[in-house]
Image (spheres, grey):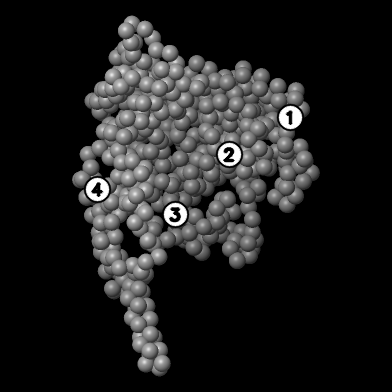
Amino acid sequence: MNFEKNNTTLLDQVIRSTSNKYFFNDLPENKFLYQKSIHEAANAVVNHLESRDTPFTGVSVEAIAEKFEKIFLDNESSLTLNETLEELKELYLNDAVNFHHNKYVAHLNCPVLTPALAAEVIISAINTSMDTWDQSIGGTFIELKLINWTLDHMGYPADADGIFTSGGTQSNLMGLLLARDQFIKTNYSIDPKMQGLPAEASKFRIFCSDVSHFSLKKNASLLGLGQNAIVPVAVDNHFRMDMSALEQAIEIEKAKGNIPIAVVGTAGTTDMGAIDPLTEIAAMAQQYGLWFHVDAAYGGGLLLSDKHKHKLKGLELSDSATIDYHKTYFQPVSSSAFFMRHKKYIDHIKYHADYLNSKEQEDEGIPNMVKKSIQTTRRFDALKLWLTLRVMGRRRLGQYIDDIIQLAQDTAMLLRTSGDFEVLNQPGISAILFRYQPFQKGQALSEEQLSRLNAYIRKAMFNEGEAVIASTKVNGSVYLKFTLLNPLTSVQDMEEIIHIIKKHGQEFFRNN
């Protein structure tokens, strides 16, 4: 028994000694393994770039699922990192959607910049958590500098503040949270942080255009207000919130005995890139005493452009705003931020934990970022934007925005002049909503036929993989969508994509 026990102890020591090499630290063998691992991972990415010339392979759900059925994660690992990366090619890399490809024009996924990817290497290795000063020395001031830089371009007052978030949904949640709690603080003698919501909260109403982001309804539900708290407002011919319809909607809700508390303007709707009349909404919000939040997750990139920044006029009048750097600042996900007009609104979020950010630390002026965030542990995502700006500068990023807007306008013209397409919007940013609408035997197709046709085209193109586009519905009918976020995509690329659309449209008629 002693012999067996000694052998078992020795084996444990060998396993422990071998496995310890995987930790990131300053031991010579561990530093070597880190460099080797990063090199091998980078090679896998480069090989992926070189092995694919399409945005997608067209692989089926069933084929991918079958590969994963053969993986057993509880088995003792016996693969080297290089062997595991080879396996990863089959499981992921070979069929990953290439958002950097010139013919990927589907969703709000931008190509990313190399300085930001270099930042990712540093972020993951150093593993800074941005919640408190004693975990994020230096990183705190990088984030603060970027927040203040953005606030300055937004035109917010000196007393404004902000925080990096995981994305637009979280930022919009924070905007509605502040709207709710500020209204309660102003109109009721309770503290919502301690006592919850007043009985009247079921009557709270928030207004937004009927083409605004779904996260508003989702967040209203999470905040205890219910999805019915979101009141959709009709849009005009350019898919911007109709101001007469907004005023009418507010008056109707008041007449019902409901309580308007906020209005959300969208600066860049997901489907069409429409920008609501922010200045007019701000005036109406002030008239009715409403919180004014702007969802500029998509349109926030216009701040980079000297040519198009004016389209965000009125943003500076909002009480809070959302901007996604991982949409139009060419950053890897996630990189987003939430902004508030006055620092005092932080009180609705702030919580002191003695082990984390005590009241004494705040009195000493220690900048603990956790007080501004609904997250505690939080990645140092700000470093990606920091390296990008320091290496490339704002003006070059602004030129990229100018380029994709020009491409969108040129593409809309291509579609209109081809004769076979209906284009719904003139792109204010870089989204185009349209459908293939040819005449068959001199007759126009019905709405049902057009929906079947365009749904077929989108699916057939995805299964083929030569180009990837998106689709959505407008008034129940299927439309196709281009979202142009790649400054390297050319008019010729778009001409080829349009040709592919027509090719699959003709296939539909041959098959039906």
Which amino acid, mark 2?
Lys
Which amino acid, mark 3?
Phe
Does label 1 or label 2 sit earlier along the sequence? 2
**Alpha carbon separation for disc pair 4 and 3:** 27 Å
Q: State the SS at label 1.
A: loop
The answer to whether the residue labelled 4 contacts the one labelled 1, judged by CB atoms less than 8 Å apart, is: no
Q: Mark 1 points at which residue?
A: 258
Of residues 403 and 170, which is closer to you in this image?
A: 170
Coordinates of residue 387 in the picture (x, y in percent)? 35, 49
Q: State the SS at label 3.
A: loop
Does label 4 or label 1 sit earlier along the sequence? 4
Q: Residue furthest right?
A: 189
Does label 4 or label 3 sit earlier along the sequence? 4
Of residues 492 and 84, which is closer to you in this image?
A: 84
Of residues 461 and 384, which is closer to you in this image?
A: 461
Coordinates of residue 100 in the picture (x, y in percent)? 30, 40
